Image (cartoon, rainbow, N blue to C red):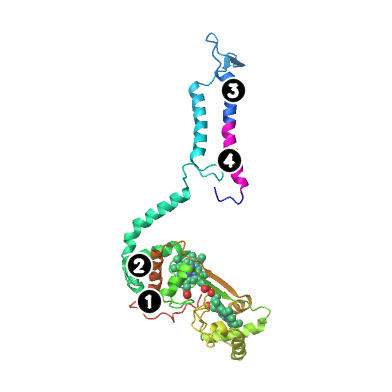
Amino acid sequence: MSDFVNGFWGYFISVVAVGGVVWCVWLLYTQRRWLSTKPVNGQVEDTGHVWDGDLTELNNPVPSWWTWMYLLACVFALGYLFFMPGLGEYKGSLGYSSAEEVARNQAKLAEAVRPIYARFETMTVPQIAADPGAREIGQRLFLNTCAQCHGSDAKGGPSFPNLADGDWLHGGSPEAIMQTITQGRVGVMPPWKGVIDPKTAGDIAQYVRSLSGLTADPVRVFRGKREFANYCVACHGVDGKGNQSLGAPNLTDEVWLYGSSEATIVQTILEGRQNRMPAHEDVLTPDQIKILTAWVWGLSNKPDAKPQATEKTAAR
Ligand code: HEC
Ligand code: HEC
């Protein structure tokens, strides 16, 4: 009840709740004369309505057990409102809170699963990544918390990075992955509309395409290269290989977050891009983050696999 935006609603609810009970009692009180009507000489008062010629509608008072139940319900309601939270901001004399109950249950659950995670406490991320039990937990955590954005195979999609390709915006070390999951990341490519005209943006796009060996017009590549040096190298580097501390992608590796067509690159340049990986420190426990880090790390660091950085995802 402390979630109301202003105090008025707390009072409103209190008035409705207490007023409702008072109204019920008042109703019973005003009807008391009729409730206590006793049959005179075994003759019950009738309402004066007669149906089908001889069916008389009687006016029997309700039985006394009903009256008592009605009163008890009113007493119960008042008692409940005294002991439990229910009257606006009033917390109830017993101090019960459903939020605390949830927190207690969560703590109990954390206690119950602790032995499962305890095994991984002293293990390094590569060791956890090699552990089949941990991989199973990691996969389930990923499907629950991450797959809606990164896909159930972790291969991402437009604007959501592929986590299995060995190519990293923010770094693929266990520490970098853990920081990404814990604190989240933002990737901001500034918009250049008004600074760079669309034709020049097209030239730059041709140059960007040439960096990863895609077909490009040599004359426009030549012009684009000059402009790239003016506007883009601060983040993407002189060689276009990007900068992980800024989350600026490598433009030479055939891995595309948005796409490699001239139109898409021009759009990226003119409109800019804003991308956010949400922080998970309030969603997952440190134990879970460690397992997930190992699971994600293990996707591109398989002991038996070749480096996958050159794998083509350009088709997207
Ligand atoms: C709401 C969507 C969303 C969810 C949920 C989400 N992510 Fe992300 N994640 C993103 C986006 C968008 C980026 C790219 C950020 C950028 O462009 O800099 C990203 C980036 C990352 C990166 C960095 C990739 C790189 O190349 O450096 C990792 C690692 C990652 N996410 C892992 C996870 C894990 C593990 C989870 C589950 C706990 C998760 N993400 C949940 C949207 C999401
Ligand atoms: C302030 C730093 C900064 C500057 C300057 C900058 N970029 Fe970016 N760029 C980024 C970041 C960060 C991203 C990733 C955005 C995201 O995470 O969604 C990005 C993304 C891109 C992409 C998308 C790559 C893909 O995989 O789809 C292209 C293309 C690109 N930039 C080209 C350029 C060009 C061309 C210029 C010069 C006109 C430029 N950038 C200038 C920071 C910058």
**Disc 1 residue type (three-letter):** Asn
Question: Residue 213 at what x, y percent from top left?
Answer: 51, 86
Q: Which residue is mark 3?
A: 31
SS category of the residue bearing label 1 = loop
Q: Nearer the viewer, residue 216 or 107?
A: 107
- Label 1 Cα crowd, 10 Å radius (few <14 / some 14-19 / many 20+): many
Q: Is residue 116 magenta?
A: no
Q: Which residue is mark 4?
A: 14
Give left or right: position of 124 versus 309: left
Q: Nearer the viewer, residue 203 or 193?
A: 193
- Sequence-wise, the earlier of marks 2 and 3 is 3
Whether pointer 2 and pointer 3 mark residues with C-beta atoms closer than 8 Å, the reply is: no
- Sequence-wise, the earlier of marks 1 and 2 is 2
Q: Is residue 208 visible?
A: yes
Q: Give the residue displayed 60% in from the left and 91% down from the top.
A: 222
Q: Nearer the viewer, residue 97 or 218?
A: 97
**Disc 4 residue type (three-letter):** Ser
Q: Which residue is mark 1?
A: 301
* Real-space CA distance between mark 4 and mark 2, rounded to the nearest whole angstrom: 52 Å
Q: Which residue is mark 2?
A: 135
**Disc 2 residue type (three-letter):** Arg
Q: Quadrant of residue 22?
A: top right
* Real-space CA distance between mark 4 and mark 3, rounded to the nearest whole angstrom: 26 Å
- Sequence-wise, the earlier of marks 4 and 3 is 4
